[in-house]
């Protein structure tokens, strides 16, 4: 949420040149997004590694119950995946003409 707010506010200032910021147009929007996402990355990294024990990775190993989750998840999400694949292929096909 904070990154979206920072991106919006910083984008307005950099795109339109409000206050002490230069008017950068589209480049300002890109710069605002870069700064907001870098801030988001730093905040998430600090929150993950700040805990006493640090970050613990849980690998998906055989016998850990992944198949119990993967089957129903695939059943629910495959229509979305097919829709996205068709959408991307149609867009790419339109661009090559």
Image (cartoon, rainbow, N blue to C red):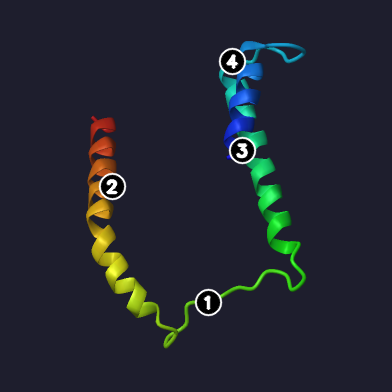
User: For numbered disc 4, what is the local secondary structure?
Assistant: loop
Disc 4, disc 1: CB below 8 Å?
no
Tell me which numbered mark, 1 or 3, is placed earlier along the sequence.
3
| Distance Cα–Cα, label 2 vs label 3 | 26 Å
Determine which residue is flagged by label 1. 59
| Distance Cα–Cα, label 1 vs label 2 | 27 Å
Which corner quadrant of the image does residue 97 belong to?
top left
| Distance Cα–Cα, label 4 vs label 1 | 44 Å
Disc 2, disc 3: CB below 8 Å?
no
User: Percent x, y for residue 65?
Assistant: 40, 82
User: Percent x, y for residue 51?
Assistant: 74, 66
Q: With 79 as the anchor, is 25 left or right in this view?
A: right
| Distance Cα–Cα, label 4 vs label 2 | 31 Å
Tell me which numbered mark, 1 or 2, is placed earlier along the sequence.
1
Relative to residue 10, is residue 63 depicted above or below?
below
Task: Name the residue rendered at 31%, 66% in the picture.
Answer: 73
């Amino acid at each position: 949420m904070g990154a979206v707010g920072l991106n919006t506010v910083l984008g307005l200032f950099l795109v339109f040149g409000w206050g002490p910021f230069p008017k950068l147009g589209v480049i300002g929007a890109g710069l605002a997004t870069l700064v907001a996402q870098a801030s988001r990355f730093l905040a998430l990294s600090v929150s993950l590694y700040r805990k006493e024990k640090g970050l613990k990775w849980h690998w998906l190993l055989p016998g850990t119950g992944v198949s119990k989750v993967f089957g129903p998840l695939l059943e629910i999400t495959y229509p979305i995946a097919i829709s996205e694949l068709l959408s991307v292929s149609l867009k790419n096909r339109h661009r090559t003409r």
